[in-house]
């Protein structure tokens, strides 16, 4: 992981997309497994717009040195073991996140043992590359031949810029005294303004360790008057991490002309986790900031106030007043016009989720204030709120969701999001509202809006609404309906697990139906029992090869059906070649 000049974190991943912008509180796409926090209902993607043919990425470094030409400043480097290369990307702001675009293969070795596992900007401002240098690039090789791995040797390369002077000497130690532990605290503060990132990081670390309050004034002065964003942020970070951030510093940061400093003002409010009125007032002001990165930082701080942790739920140190929090979140939403900003939308949900889990009415009251201009973010919040309500496993909370659904006008942009959230949230759950649902669902089933009517059918069927079940099951075998609608209806029938659903799916495997529908129906019948085996054998000669494979897998899923399948095979009514090895 490394950070850009504004303190944004970037991460390289090995065998999936190679670059991620790690916004605090984000849940990200991973190589395998599920995230620890199940209530995000989304994983954020990488920021790359390209891929490399061979990929096993290692190391990452944003170039913030002073030895190379300015065109390289802020670009990002990543090693690639399988490609024997170091790639260079450019980072371009993209809403509240970034886009990582290929600039060049900065290094490509003619030696297959070159393994650039780490890249770092050194004290000279050049790029230092750690080369594992081994014939084996992966753990699979090491497991197969553990004695063949060289664990004792490697190489370090230093990539310097000499321009047209190829023989120019560039010292690795540009200054005589580089033992930062021997510098005075005042000298360390001066190094926070150094043009090379190595010196800034070293000075900040030593100042953090010393906690020397005699330089508090120097740090405050440099934060206020520093000539570069880097020096000002380094001073602000040091003030905070050393415990010397004065109460009047954050209001100044909130009013700063630099978006990065305003964003860090919000972040530090969250880091403090005080939840006091002055801090909430600062977040309320920043919530309407025109810059997405600032509003994202407000969402991160909000999450730290409502939950003690960013990516799991823990009790906050002090729970602020909910109405004050609602004002902040409402302001962020109102300031976020329709845009496909996945990161901002995701973090606003993560901010609201702890409050929604305690009382969903918090979100319903907030979402009731939506407008067409903010439908993108409010739609996301509505969908995820309904998912979270379902995961609470409370009929009373489902009643509240039903009331919210009934309060939305027929033309409201949030309707399909609310219905879809409830449909997805009900999958695998046997839960319905305590209240009657017919009065709310009936007008939705008759809606001229195709998506609203479809989701209402699916939801009503799951809740046992007679009208919805009848409409959904009829759609399975409606030859005039679009195929995707029939497939969704078949998926709903699969969840109903009753006689009517089984009959609808049995009709769907008859000749003349589209193959995707037949395959979906066969898969659904595996869960519905009854005379499924006999029906599948009766249609066997009409099935395509794909349908026969699906039917064999369904028949193999139950002992009595499997016995019948073996009998059919023995009597040569079914060919062994029709049966997949997985059945």
Image (tube, rainbow, N blue to C red):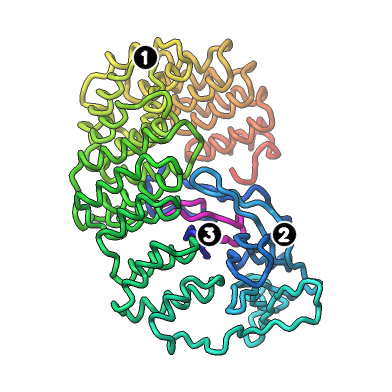
Which sits in the foreground, 533 or 291? Answer: 291
Instruction: Say which residue appears at 45% left-offset and 50% top-offset.
Output: 259
Q: Are marks 1 and 2 in contact (CB under 8 Å)?
A: no
Q: Earlier in the sequence, mark 2 or mark 3?
A: 3
Q: Write the start and end of the magenta stretch as one range.
A: 9-29
Q: Which mark is residue 54?
A: 2
Which sits in the foreground, 24 or 91? Answer: 91
* Residue carrying label 3: 10
Counting other residues with Cα less than 10 Å from the Cα at mark 3, is it few (<14), some (14-19), or many (20 or more)? many
Left or right: 151 in relation to 254: right
Which sits in the foreground, 404 or 148? Answer: 404
Magenta stretch containing residue 25, yes or no? Answer: yes
- Which secondary structure class fits the magenta region best? loop
Q: Which mark is residue 79?
A: none
Instruction: Say which residue appears at 40% left-offset and 10% top-offset.
Output: 446
Left or right: 243 in relation to 19: left
Q: Are marks 2 and 3 in contact (CB under 8 Å)?
A: no
SS under mark 3 = strand
Q: Earlier in the sequence, mark 1 or mark 2?
A: 2
Counting other residues with Cα less than 10 Å from the Cα at mark 1, is it few (<14), some (14-19), or many (20 or more)? some
Magenta stretch containing residue 546, yes or no? Answer: no
The x, y position of residue 204, in whole percent, is 42, 74
Q: Which mark is residue 410?
A: 1
The x, y position of residue 315, in whole percent, is 23, 55
Viewer-nearest of discs 2 and 3: 3
Q: Earlier in the sequence, mark 1 or mark 3?
A: 3
């Amino acid at each position: 992981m490394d950070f850009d000049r504004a303190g944004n974190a970037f991460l390289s991943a090995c065998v999936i997309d190679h670059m991620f912008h790690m916004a605090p509180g984000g849940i990200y796409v991973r190589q395998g497994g599920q995230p620890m926090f199940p209530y995000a209902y989304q994983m954020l993607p990488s920021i790359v717009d390209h891929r490399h043919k061979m990929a096993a990425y290692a190391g990452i470094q944003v170039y913030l040195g002073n030895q190379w030409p300015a065109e390289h400043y802020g670009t990002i480097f990543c090693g690639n073991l399988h490609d024997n290369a170091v790639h260079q990307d450019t980072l371009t702001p993209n809403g509240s996140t970034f886009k990582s675009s290929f600039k060049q293969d900065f290094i490509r070795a003619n030696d297959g043992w070159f393994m650039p596992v780490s890249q770092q900007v050194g004290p000279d401002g050049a790029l230092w590359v750690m080369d594992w240098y081994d014939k084996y690039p992966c753990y699979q090789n090491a497991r197969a031949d553990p004695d063949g791995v060289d664990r004792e040797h490697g190489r370090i390369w230093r990539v310097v810029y000499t321009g047209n002077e190829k023989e120019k000497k560039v010292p690795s130690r540009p200054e005589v005294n580089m033992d930062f532990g021997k510098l005075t605290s005042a000298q360390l503060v001066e190094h926070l303004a150094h043009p090379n990132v190595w010196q800034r990081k070293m000075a900040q670390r030593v100042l953090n360790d010393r906690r020397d309050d005699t330089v508090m004034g120097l740090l405050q002065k440099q934060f206020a008057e520093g000539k570069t964003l880097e020096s000002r942020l380094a001073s602000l970070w040091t003030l905070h991490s050393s415990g010397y951030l004065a109460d009047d510093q954050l209001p100044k940061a909130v009013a700063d002309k630099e978006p990065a400093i305003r964003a860090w003002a919000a972040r530090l409010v969250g880091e403090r986790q005080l939840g006091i009125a002055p801090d909430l007032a600062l977040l309320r002001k920043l919530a309407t900031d025109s810059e997405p990165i600032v509003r994202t930082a407000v969402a991160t701080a909000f999450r730290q106030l409502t939950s003690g942790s960013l990516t799991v739920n823990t009790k906050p140190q002090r729970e602020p007043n909910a109405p004050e929090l609602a004002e902040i979140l409402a302001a962020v939403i109102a300031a976020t016009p329709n845009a496909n900003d996945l990161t901002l939308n995701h973090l606003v949900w993560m901010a609201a989720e702890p409050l929604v889990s305690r009382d969903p009415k918090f979100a319903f009251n907030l979402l009731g204030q939506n407008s067409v201009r903010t439908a993108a973010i409010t739609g996301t919040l509505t969908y995820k709120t309904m998912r979270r309500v379902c995961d609470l496993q409370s009929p009373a909370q489902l009643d509240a969701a039903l009331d919210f659904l009934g309060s939305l006008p027929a033309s409201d942009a949030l309707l399909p999001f609310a219905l879809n959230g409830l449909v997805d949230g009900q999958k695998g759950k046997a839960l319905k509202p305590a209240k009657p649902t017919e009065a709310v669902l009936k007008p939705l089933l008759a809606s001229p809006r195709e998506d609203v009517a479809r989701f209402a059918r699916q939801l009503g069927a799951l809740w046992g609404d007679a009208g919805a079940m009848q409409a959904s099951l009829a759609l399975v075998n409606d030859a005039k309906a679009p195929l995707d609608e029939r497939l969704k209806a078949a998926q709903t029938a699969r969840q109903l697990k009753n006689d009517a659903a089984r009959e609808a799916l049995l009709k769907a495997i008859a000749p003349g139906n589209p193959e995707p529908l037949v395959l979906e129906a066969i898969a659904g019948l595996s869960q519905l029992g009854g005379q499924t085996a006999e029906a599948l054998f009766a249609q066997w000669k009409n099935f395509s090869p794909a349908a026969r494979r699906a039917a064999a897998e369904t028949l193999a899923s139950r002992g009595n059906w499997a016995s019948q399948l073996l009998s059919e095979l023995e009597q040569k009514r079914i060919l062994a070649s029709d049966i997949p090895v997985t059945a």
